[in-house]
């Protein structure tokens, strides 16, 4: 939901995320070549936002310039605030439609044995 709202609001592709975008492929392949048995485990944790405001605070923290992951989508404070405004409009529409915002956090782990 997080990425879907941002894509809808910006009409731009989501920048590649280090780690998560390589986890199943590059990292898993490396571990598999070193161990006799490997298993990719996934943990999904739905996070429900009962209002739009806490979701927007999460978005602000995630897209902040300090993280350097999303800066391809904006240049400076003014564009950042405009981006947040567009995301808030889309999130509000989704909230009005669904009565809540549910974002599923996905975490992976590799279980490997020699």
Image (cartoon, rainbow, N blue to C red):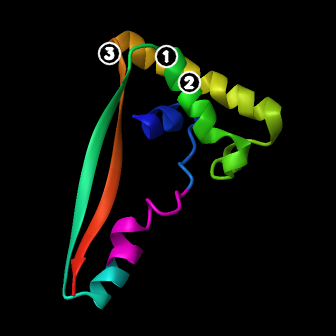
User: Which quadrant holds the N terminus?
Assistant: top left
- Looking at the image, which residue is at 32% across and 15% down? 98
- Contact flag, marks 1 and 2 (Cβ < 8 Å): yes
Q: Give whichever of 22, 8 is nearer the camera.
A: 22
Q: Which region is colored magenta?
A: 16-28
- Looking at the image, which residue is at 64% across and 47% down? 70
Which of the two labelled residues, at mark 3 and mark 1, occupies the earlier sequence position?
1
Which of the two labelled residues, at mark 2 and mark 3, occupies the earlier sequence position?
2
Q: Is residue 24 magenta?
A: yes
Q: Secondary structure at mark 2?
A: helix
Q: In the picture shown, does residue 94 fall above or below 32? A: above
Q: How many marks?
A: 3
Query: Crowdedness of circle 2 by 10 Å Cα count: few (<14), some, many (20+)?
Result: some
Q: Which residue is mark 3?
A: 98
Q: Position of residue 107 (x, y in %)?
A: 34, 52
User: Which of pointers 3 and 1 indicates the residue nearer the eye?
Assistant: 1
User: Which quadrant holds the C terminus?
Assistant: bottom left
Q: Position of residue 68 (x, y in %)?
A: 69, 52
Q: CA distance from mark 2 to mark 3?
A: 16 Å
Q: Secondary structure at mark 3?
A: helix
């Amino acid at each position: 939901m997080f990425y879907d709202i941002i894509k809808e609001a910006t009409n731009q592709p989501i920048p590649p995320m280090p780690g998560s975008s390589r986890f199943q492929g590059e990292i898993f392949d490396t571990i598999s070549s070193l161990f006799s048995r490997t298993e990719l485990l996934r943990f999904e944790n739905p996070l429900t936002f009962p209002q739009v405001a806490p979701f927007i605070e999460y978005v602000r923290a995630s897209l902040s310039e300090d993280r350097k992951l999303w800066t391809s989508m904006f240049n400076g404070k003014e564009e950042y605030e405009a981006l947040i405004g567009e995301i808030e409009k889309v999130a509000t529409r989704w909230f009005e439609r669904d009565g809540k915002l549910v974002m599923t956090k996905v975490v992976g782990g590799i279980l490997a044995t020699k």
